[in-house]
Image (cartoon, helix red, strand yellow):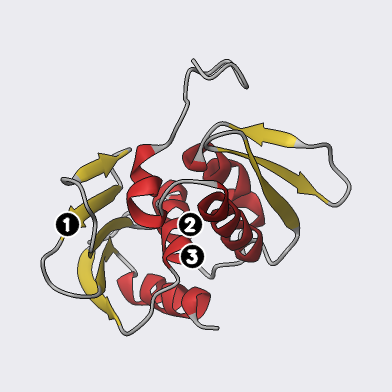
Amino acid sequence: MCGACGTGIAAAPWETQLVGEGPRAGRALAAAATRATGARITVRTWGAAGFVSQARTAPLRTHPNLESLCHALLPALRLGLPEPAGSMARRLVVPLPGEVDVPGLTVWSALAASSGAASIALCGPISRQSARIHGRLLLEPSAEPGWRVAITAPCAEECAHSLQNFLSP
C-alpha cells in the first residue's frame, strides 16, 4: 500500500506503458486531462500515480489513478464524444501520422472508454504484452511503426473526429 490514499494502488501500470514513469509523464497526463475539460477543471499530479482535480469553485478531489480521474471528469468533458448508443457497433481503425501526443492519446482513450461511447484498442510501440483495462480499453503491442487506434462504436466516425480534434495542436 502506498499510504497516500489508502486504496493500495501505488502505480497505474497501463498508462506507464504508454507515457513512461516519473513526474514529467504525470504532469503531461494532468495537462491533457485539463485540456479535455476545456480548462474548466484543473488537474495536477498527486503521489506516484494519482491526480488532484479542482473545478473553479469546488474543493480539491483526489483520484488514485487515471481511471478514477476519468470517471470524475466525464460530466465536464469537452471532447465531442457521442452519447453511448445501443445500435450496431462498427469498427474503424485510425492511423495516427507522425509525432503523436502520447499523453493526450492516453487520456482521450481512457475518457472515451470510461464514457461508454466506444471500445478502444491502442496499437503501437508498447513494450509489454497486451492488457485489457476495464473491458473497454485494450493495449496491443505492434511491430509496425507508429500508432493506430481501433474504435468500436455505433458512431465510430464521430469518435475518430473527436480524437483527431483533441490531438491536433
Residue 85 seen in the figure:
no
Query: Of the numbered discs in the image, which one, if any, rests on residue 107?
Result: 2
- The answer to the question of whether label 2 and label 3 lie on touching residues, with beta carbons closer than 8 A, is yes
Callout 2 amino acid: Val
Using a 10 Å C-alpha cutoff, classify the residue at mark 3 as few (fewer than 14 neighbours), some (14 to 19) or many (20 or more).
many
Residue 50 x %, y %: 57, 36
Query: Of the numbered discs in the image, which one, if any, rests on residue 104?
Result: 3
Residue 100 seen in the figure:
yes
Q: Quadrant of the C terminus?
A: bottom right
Callout 3 amino acid: Gly
Nearer to us in this view, 102 or 108: 102
Quarter of image, res 157: bottom left
Nearer to us in this view, 123 or 10: 10
Label 2, label 3: how many angstroms apart (C-alpha)?
Answer: 5 Å
Label 3, label 1: how many angstroms apart (C-alpha)?
Answer: 18 Å
Residue 136 x %, y %: 30, 47
Task: Kindly give the residue lying farthest to the right in the view shown.
Answer: 57
Residue 79 x %, y %: 55, 67
Is residue 93 rendered to the left or right of residue 159? left
Q: Which residue is mark 1?
A: 141
Query: Of the numbered discs in the image, which one, if any, rests on residue 101?
Result: none
Element under label 2?
helix
Label 2, label 1: how many angstroms apart (C-alpha)?
Answer: 18 Å
Callout 1 amino acid: Pro
Residue lying at 49% horizontally and 65% vertically, measured from the top left: 104
